[in-house]
Amino acid sequence: TQLLEQSPQFLSIQEGENLTVYCNSSSVFSSLQWYRQEPGEGPVLLVTVVTGGEVKKLKRLTFQFGDARKDSSLHITAAQPGDTGLYLCAGENTGNQFYFGTGTSLTVIP
Amino acid sequence: KAGVTQTPRYLIKTRGQQVTLSCSPISGHRSVSWYQQTPGQGLQFLFEYFSETQRNKGNFPGRFSGRQFSNSRSEMNVSTLELGDSALYLCASSFSPVPNTEAFFGQGTRLTVV
């Protein structure tokens, strides 16, 4: 059973397009993180959100934590080939268990 | 400063054998977590150690075990290997238990069981 479901699972877009990745759960999370993983490498932390409704921006990336702290989204504006990778959400639930999402594989075509 | 080092990078083992993987955290980090990554199941939490004590454990069989040494280096062991244990095993280190501080991942050990 996956506590954190991500959608879409795969995404292939042209350079310059916008996209949104979703991370959904029926469980409440005390905090949620987003990572990007490139082939042959471990995941690298992009952001941590802790407050319901919180929005954080990292250059062209916008992260939002749902009001009920059960879901999150990652929006990328004007995607670039360097954004290609596996995007993972991860969170700690109220039982101190840390889970990763199912992942979204993004390919940005030049 | 040096990142998280995992050894070996690649490993091929036969069913029924056992294997030990090593993780050297970033200097000063006392928390080490282990994850298994497969195409079908994604990234799954194995266990977390902090100051030589197992703080948390995922839902894996007892064949999977780990330990942490006084210098914070950690090892994980898988006994009686099964084909389904083939995966990328990732180690992450942090100053204190996740997710309170940022975790830094190593490049992983790619284990293939034949």
Image (cartoon, coloured by chain):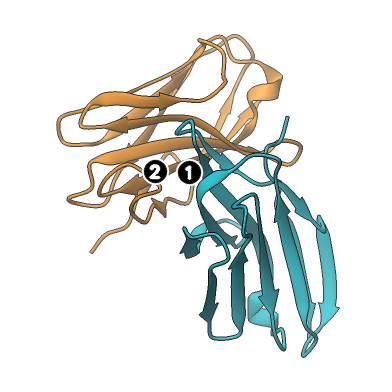
Chain colours: A cyan, B orange
Of residues A59 and A109, the one nearer the viewer is A59
Quarter of the image holding residue A85? bottom right
* Quadrant where the N terminus of chain B is found in the figure: bottom left
Q: Residues within 10 Å of mark 1 (few under 14, many from 20)?
A: some
Name the amino acid type tagged 1: Arg
At x 61% / y 85%, what residue is drawn? A60
- The reply to whether label 1 and label 2 mark residues of one chain is yes
The vertical placement of A102 against A110, above or below, is above
At x 32% / y 57%, what residue is drawn? B3
CB contact under 8 Å: marks 1 and 2: yes
Lateral position of residue B5 relative to residue A82, left or right? left
Of residues A17 and B87, the one nearer the viewer is A17
Q: Residues within 10 Å of mark 2 (few under 14, many from 20)?
A: many
Residue A56 place in picture, x, y as percent: 52, 75
Residue B62 place in picture, x, y as percent: 50, 10
Residue B81 place in picture, x, y as percent: 59, 15
At x 52% / y 80%, what residue is drawn? A58
Q: Which residue is mark 2?
A: B6
Residue B58 shows in the view: yes
Q: Chain of mark 2?
A: B
Element under disc 2? strand
Q: Which residue is mark 1?
A: B9
CA separation in Å, label 1 and label 2: 7 Å
Of residues B86 and A14, the one nearer the viewer is A14
